[in-house]
Every structure is written in structure tokens, then in C-alpha cells.
Amino acid sequence: MISDKMQELVSTSSLIRAMFEEGKRLSAIYGEDNVFDFSLGNPNLEPPENIKNSIIEILNDESPNYVHGYMNNSGYEDVREAIASFLNKKHSLNLSHDNIVMTCGAAGGLNIIFKTLLNPCDEVIVFAPYFGEYNNYVENFQGNLVVVSPDLTTFEPDLTELEKKITQKTKAIIINTPNNPTGVVYSEDLIKRLSDLLEKKQQEFNTSIYLISDEPYREIVYDGVNVPCILNYYKNSLIGYSYSKSLSLPGERIGYIVANSDMDDFSDFMAALNVANRILGFVNAPSLFQRVVAKALDSEVDINLYKKNRDLLYNHLVKIGFECIKPQGAFYLFPKALIEDDVKFADEAKKFNLLIVPGSSFGCPGYFRLSYCISYDKIEKSLDAFTKLANMYLK
Amino acid sequence: MISDKMQELVSTSSLIRAMFEEGKRLSAIYGEDNVFDFSLGNPNLEPPENIKNSIIEILNDESPNYVHGYMNNSGYEDVREAIASFLNKKHSLNLSHDNIVMTCGAAGGLNIIFKTLLNPCDEVIVFAPYFGEYNNYVENFQGNLVVVSPDLTTFEPDLTELEKKITQKTKAIIINTPNNPTGVVYSEDLIKRLSDLLEKKQQEFNTSIYLISDEPYREIVYDGVNVPCILNYYKNSLIGYSYSKSLSLPGERIGYIVANSDMDDFSDFMAALNVANRILGFVNAPSLFQRVVAKALDSEVDINLYKKNRDLLYNHLVKIGFECIKPQGAFYLFPKALIEDDVKFADEAKKFNLLIVPGSSFGCPGYFRLSYCISYDKIEKSLDAFTKLANMYLK
């Protein structure tokens, strides 16, 4: 008696659960130490030490009705102001609390953005490979997801194909940089060309095309690479941010949306995000953690540990014959599978107790994703299994 | 460029904001002490003292990656098990963690319930007066809200009209007890008759009709009244609960859904709630506060303070000539306005610095709502203003 759409989604999710159960089954047979789970994006680094201290400070210093109470559906004004100032300094912007809505993580943020923007059958364009949940977020509001094929050389958006796919119905484009699943950080040059193309298309169709940058990994970057801030390049732009990764707080559901003051209908847009936050049932981002992140704007987990993981795993995979772009952000590798059928390849990997996610889940068959947000020791121990897997095909 | 529906909603919400701004304007002129805001359902009682201690204990005793990390989208299993045991003892039930999904408050809970149940154009029936947000929650998933007229004598659901309004398309009925805005607690007799009617109608139409009890005020009851647990009366039943009021934690967005094991398609239903929690962007209820409420199951705010407020305000209003049912729960009074036009009456009340909500907002014109979750002193100070307001019409 559940709805038809949910009936479908429950079937799909039971496949994911089956994978998870398989991991538990393997652990029961071989011992947890000998099963190498690269399937989950659950950060293993501890939150910075000042998170705990900040919580205790807040509980001691502020009134409990204030800390745990309702506030404006967009979030505490002082928290939004603090985030605006932080971003102004970092990216030479001119934001105030009016540009910010506190959200239940980036997932909550994207849902209220689509609730705000989409009429039924509006189109949202993504670039493969992409985070599979975008399908659901857009469908929640009767939008249609349009997928641009992957550029397998750079894993940056293919602007030639994008140009062909923009129509009168295109309401938004999602980019995700640093990217899940590739780890690629989009270059400033790409952002500029993308912005120019969108400006041109807006004029051609006399529409507004919103550029949404989903940036839960913004702080997780290596080798001194720069993540360009799209607010500096394109007027109809906004960012969905989450503290899940930068502060290792994924369960607390805390993030924000920041929107460009120069966008079309800015004040209606911000008012609508506020209403959408309320009526979708978020009401507001969790109150205590709004206050916590405002005290920890300069903090982040120790990125060097992720970098060590990346280097260890990447260097080994390339050495044994995998093709893989060297990612400069996030905590994923996206190597090419050694056979065409990535689902079958992921199945084969299980024989070596390796749990990996087929690229098909990201709209990019023939590849697979490895999450290296697990312990260094575990990765070290897994290398031999990857070698054995590779030897099945490459020797 | 925002969606057509959001355009409408933004206009409505700016009316609410105008009311809020009016309060600020009056405070600026007359001083905050002389403005009597009975419009908001924001609990004024402090959370129980053990909330703070529980938070600190959890931070000291448990690993930060566990406390702030991802878990099953339905919530921590041990937390759900603890809630199930608590409910089993309280209501003689036989629940386990499988019956429970932790949610972002009751608002988040209702949204994932409707996402789970509704096909486009399915009908959900409510009883006026009702919490206006139900309109939005049902429309989020293309459902149609069907309203049963108020029974102005008892403010209990009118079952005769309900019977006529149940159709082949009826997917769910919402009850809200203790009720916002009337404060009425539905009797066991009513729940039994409602259950019998729904059983009969299910057979007649060969459908499943889910009875959803929205119970954020379940613990806020007076005079030893009993709130019957619908899981004991009707198979296709579920409860949306929130700790916002019982623990004064409305900003933390923590609650749960508990569903009857005997309902149709129970396991699909629970799996779908889990998926809906994920794809609507909640992902999971905030993690730290899941663990906090599990440690505070026996705690509640000091209800006697709300009761003192109720008695003071109710007794005065009745004495000066208002007609009002004496509520046994929640923290609202719902008196009859002294003129037919409740919106105009609320406007008139402002002349005495009284901020009240017209009954029209709850589908029940001719009445108005007073939230008495404010300080006793403030209520005491407001009594004279109510007398002056009444004298305009009754002398």
C-alpha cells in the first residue's frame, strides 16, 4: 500500500542493503580485519578536538532555551553572519547573513533548492559520473534529471555536450567539486568557460539557469590546489555546503546554502528557501550544531591523513596496472575496471574480500569507486588483495 | 524564477512575517514588557537539567566518530530499542527497534510518512481545526487534503462527516491529540469509534486507510487525563512523535515514528520510511540528540508550570465572558472570537498589544488561538488587556 515510486525505491535500496549484508557475511567468515570495505563515504578521521570543547562551552555559557530553541527557519542570524564573514575573507566576497540559509547538511540543502526552483518537468543537468542521490532529489519535486556523458580523459564537465542538452526547460546545472566519485577538482578555466556558456544560453532562451555547486568536499583538497568559488564567476550561482566531511560530523546534519546576491529574484529565492526548509519538515538546521560550527569556522580534520591514504592506494593501483586519474580532492579514487562489466568486476573483487562500488551507480559504467576514508593500516593490508585482483586480468 | 507553488507560499509566509514584524513594532513603541505575544508555540520552559549532563556524559564516554557519525538511516538501533522498551512498558505494547524510525522532529516524520504513502491525488483527511502545515506536508507529495468540519461543541472529530468524506482515494487520516489549537485530548471512546469506522470503510472499499496520530504534545497533559495509544486500537496505525515540547528541544529536530507491526505491508512500509528519510535529505535524525533522548526517556519539563498558566488564563477569560472549552493538554486555548470575523478580531486585539492567531489559520473561522507557553508573569500582566478587549464587545 506504499506509493508506486517508493515501491521501486525500496527494491533498489534492498540491493544496496544486500551489498552491505555481504560485507557482514564476509567479515563473519574471514574476520573483520581481513575484509576491505572501500564502499562507504563515512569519514574515519576524528572531529577536531575543539568541537567537544565548543559544545561544552555553549552549554555552560548560553541559555538552554536559546541553544535548543526555535529560531528563524533560515538559522540563527549571528551564525549566518559569522559564516558570511568567513567566506568574505576567504573568497573576497561581500556576503551578509541574508545570503545564507543553514541546512540539514548538503542533502537537506539540495532538497530545499529543488523545492524552491522546480516546476514539474523542469530539467536539471548533471555531469556523469555523478552522486546517484541527485536522481532522487530532483524526482522528489517532479523534475527531470538530464545527464551529460563523462569526459573520460579529464573527468571535467563536457561543455560541448552540455551546450546541446540545455533547453528552454533547463532550470539548473549541478556541479560537484571536489567530485564524488572521481576526486577531481574543477579548474578555474573550466568554471569560466562553463559560466560563459550558461550566460550565452540564458540570453538565447531568455531564461534563468541556476548553477548549483555541491561542495561537501570543499576543504578536502591536496597538493595546494585551489577550488574556485563560483560566486565570483557567475551571477545565478549558489553553493550547497556541509560540515560532514570537513569536521567529520556527518550524523549531525549541519551545512548551509550560500547564494549570490546578484542572482535573478534573489530576495524571493532566499525567502523561498526559508519556507521550503520549514514545509519540507526540516524546520531549521539542528540548533546546537549551528552554534558549534560558528565556533569552529577555521577548524578542519587533519587532511594530511587522507592525503597519505590517497598516495598509498593510488601509487599501488597505478603500479599494478590500473588506469586512474590522480585526484586532488575528496576521499575517492575512480579507477577503470579491468573488464567492461563493472558490476561483474565488483563481484569478482569480493572474492578477494574487496568491497567496491561499480561506476554504473554514478552513471559511468566501466569504472569503480574506492572510498579511502578508512584507516591507513587497513589500506596497507588491502594492497595485496588488489594485486591479486589485477593479476586475474593483467598477467 | 522560483517555482509557481513556492511563489504562492512565499506570499503567504510574508503575511505571517508581517504579523511578527508588527509585534516588533509594538515592542519598540510600548516596550517588550507591555506587548503580549500569544502567537508562537515556542516552549518557554527550560529543558530538564539531565539533558545537559547527558550531552556531556555522551561526549566523555563515547567515541566522537560514533556519536557524530552516520548510522542506519532509521537511526541507532540501541536508541530505537530503548524507545521501543519505554513504549512497551507505558502502553503494554510489543515493539522492537524494527517499529521505530528516528526523525527530524514530528514535521520531518510526517513528511517521510506522506512521501512513503502518497500517490498523486491520494486523499488525506484532517479534522478542523488543524495545524495549517498539514496542507503543505500533503501537497509536497501531490496529495489532496480533505477537511472535516469542526465539531464546535466538543472539538473532537466529527465521525458522521468523516464517514461521508472517506472515498476510494483516502490513504490516511491525521489526528492530533492533545490537539493544536484546541488543547483537547481525544477520548478512548472516540478512538474506538474512529477505529471501527475505519475498519468498516477499509472493507467497503477494499483499501488500506492509515491512521496517523501526530503527538508532539503527548506528554503535555493535565488533570490526570489519559491519551489513548492508537496502536492498541487500530492495525493500520502509526504515531509521529517529537521531543520538542516534552523536553523543550524544538530547535534540535528530534523525534520518531512508531508503527504498528500488524499494519498492511509493515516491512515495506518501514523500509520505505528509511529510504524516504534518506532521499528527502534528512539522511538521519541528528545523531548526538538521538543518543541524548535515549538517556532521558523518563524526563520531561515541569508540566505544572504550563498547568498554572492554563488555569490563570482560562479562568480569567471565562470570567470576563469568553466562551472556551477547558483544554486538558498542549499549551493552547481556542476561545470563540467576540465577532464573527476572527481576522478582524485579531486585528482589534493588537490595539491592546495582544498578539493572537485567527482560527481561520486552522480552518476554523470565528475562533482564535492563544499559546500560553510564555511566562506566568506575562500572562498575569496581560489579563487586563483581555478585559479591555472583551469590554469593547460585551459591555
Image: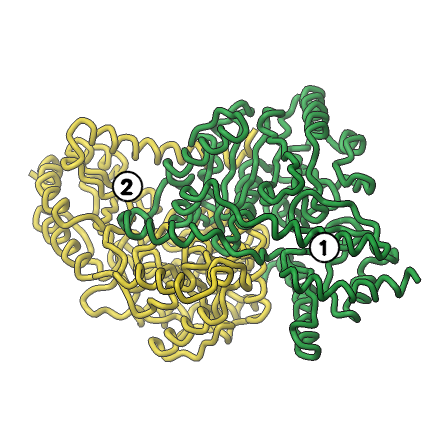
Chain colours: A green, B yellow
Which quarter of the figure has residue A369? bottom right
Could you say which is closer to the camera, residue A340 or residue A315? Answer: A315
Residue B186 lies left or right of residue A190; in this view the side is: left
Residue B93 lies left or right of residue A355; in this view the side is: left
Measured as percent of width and height from the top left, residue A65 is found at 28, 50
Q: Which mark is residue A370?
A: none
Could you say which is closer to the camera, residue A360 or residue A193? Answer: A193
Q: What amino acid is found at the position of numbered circle 2 in the picture?
A: Pro
Secondary structure of the residue carrying numbered label 2: strand
Residue at 43% over, 28% down: A96
Could you say which is closer to the camera, residue A80 or residue A185? Answer: A185
Which quadrant holds the C terminus of chain B?
top left
Residue B286 lies left or right of residue B224; in this view the side is: right
Chain letter of mark 1 equals A
The reply to whether residue A217 is in sight is yes
Q: What amino acid is found at the position of numbered circle 1 in the picture?
A: Leu
CA neighbours of label 2 inside 10 A, class few (<14), some (14 to 19), many (20+): many
Residue at 61% over, 47% down: A137
Residue at 83% over, 50% down: A323
Q: CA distance from mark 2 to mark 1?
A: 65 Å
| Residue where numbered disc 1 is placed | A312
Residue at 60% over, 31% down: A229
Residue B235 versus residue A256 in the image, above or below: below
| Residue where numbered disc 2 is placed | B358
